[in-house]
Amino acid sequence: MNTVNLTINGKAVSVPAGSTILDAAKQLNIQIPTLCYCEKLGGCGISNKPASCRICVVEVEKRRNLAPACATPVMEGMVVHTNTQRALKARRTILELMLSDHPQDCLTCAKNQDCDLQKLASEFGISKIEFSGAVNKFDVDDSSEAIMRDLSKCIMCRRCETVCNKVQTVGALTGNGRGFSAKVGTASMIPLAETSCTFCGQCVNVCPVGAITGISYVKKVWAAINDPTKTVIVQTAPAVRVAVGQEFGFEPGKPVTKKLVAGLRALGFDKVFDTNFSADLTIMEEGHEIVERIKENKNLPILTSCCPGWINFIEQNYPDLLHIPSSCKSPQQMFGAIAKSYYAEKIGVKPEDLIVVSIMPCQAKKYEAARPEFAPNGVRDVDYVVTTRELCKMFREAGVNLANMEDEEFDNPLGLSSGAADIFGVTGGVLEAACRSVYFMINGKNLEGDAINFRAVRGLDGVKEAMVEIAPGKTIRVAACSGLGNARKVLDMVRQDPNRFQAIEIMACPGGCINGGGQPFLHGDSALLEKRMKGIYTEDESKVLRLSHENTDIQALYKEFLGEPGSEKAHHLLHTTYHQK
């Protein structure tokens, strides 16, 4: 490997050729402030370094102009000074100019205390805006019911544009205007709901300020909890339990399931249930669908349909393939449908008086819950969706600290689940859970020992291919991919060779739901995804029940209410259709 020798603040350092000044400074533990720079957008290997903010400027000997450290390649013998009076003055001026064109509503901003601009202003000791003049003002775009944009706060770092175009390949965001009025927005500045946006929320995760945030329904949830005429139940997704704990001092990735249950109950929910219950239900329906399609050799490869961001993506980009996704609703929507029918009937409550709240790692779940096909007779299956980040704020508002909560169990009958349901939270998990039960459906017996673990589809690689044995002597080729850029690669493979795969799992967010658009921010630490993934598999392995079809409450649901997987009633409540957009 070729190396380059240079000096920074009087300290010698050798770094690989092609490194930047910022890379070299990190080797010496020299801190240079950054804002537009982001090393690993969306938890993947693509970085954002447009050098647009100039907060990272440094002085390089024998150069007339200050150089942006994030985008300036090192050169042999280069001499760099990061903290000269000239560099510090330039950074402060740049930051003050940014603040002069930024709304001063930090206390009420969704990114308060999570804002990189706010953090820099504090570190620079800025207590007064020195510049005054024209200020950009834009209407807030809340057209999507999932993601809100306030371009008055955009600092043109272009992180959202890069993650949308290069990581997710959605292409909903682009630079608009020039000079003072330049902002990152949609093409022709149309509302987000009218674009190709999938509402995956990765733009929300990488925005350093409050220009892109999720639309919050927390106030409506509080109002419902305190309405004596309503019965309010809550479901919580598998990825939430391995992320929420880090906000309350737990080791990142540590499952805090039982403390989460206690916390939700303390907020005032009438019943606390588990989305994992309906994940097991999803496997029963989707597994049946997989078996039928393989037998008939029709509409293959079957594509999983649990992720609403990915479903939005195929509806917009691959309408010619809309016959191959599973017709199953997501676990969130299956839970809502069962709650508003089976459970409401059990407890004697009208569906319109039963409020279903979802705790999800995802922004797209808010859009999914609002889809008209999931509101039969005008009553939504899922009334409100709250993200993991929003739940943490609810806990703090109510004085609930998960670290101080005693362990509690989920309520029944919608609280029992298998380890197969837990792994829905990570890329490859839905496919693995399905394979466990498909094997039983075909052979009438369970996989034994380590054979239950389909390790070939595990891990954070963007695309994983494997051969899976579903019966003695019979194998199928499967693929699991995460990130919509990788989904595009796999779907292009399917277009070129429809027989290449028989089953495919796709998750919109890199790494799956553990990296959803509503999870606690990674702050550039992609190692957190590894820890969350480990926590998911720990949950699975700690359970005696690891197969969806052995969930006794699921068995009772079919016996008492649905009949059997794929029945007419199951199709009416648990399945849907997708449409070109």
Image (tube, grey):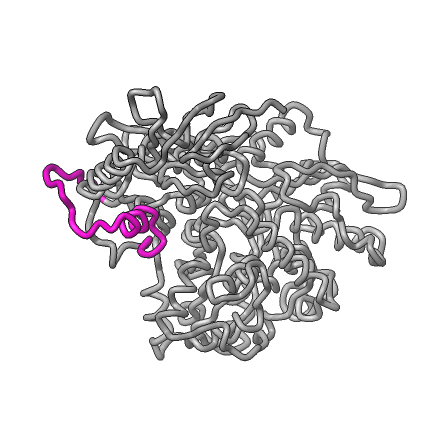
Give the residue at x 66% y 41%: 480
Location of residue 130 in the rendering, given as x and y in whole percent from the top left corner: 13, 43
Q: Is most of the magenta stretch helix, strand or loop? A: loop
- Which quarter of the figure is the N terminus placed in? top right
- Which quarter of the figure is the C terminus placed in? top left
- Assess whether residue 128 is covered by the magenta stretch: yes
Is 124 placed above or below 159 here? Answer: below
Location of residue 366 in the rendering, given as x and y in whole percent from the top left corner: 42, 53
Is 13 placed above or below 440 here? Answer: above
423 to the left or right of 214:
right
Give the residue at x 59% y 29%: 489
Give the residue at x 63% y 68%: 561
Location of residue 412 in the rendering, given as x and y in whole percent from the top left corner: 59, 75
Q: Which of 530 and 480 is in front in this view?
A: 530
Tally the numbered discs.
Answer: 0
User: Can residue 379 be seen here?
Assistant: no
Q: Which residue lies furthest to the right in this view?
A: 473
Figure quadrant of residue 505 = top right
Span colored in magenta: 110-139
Location of residue 376 in the rendering, given as x and y in whole percent from the top left corner: 45, 57
Q: Which of 91 and 219 is in front in this view?
A: 91
Give the residue at x 74% y 43%: 456
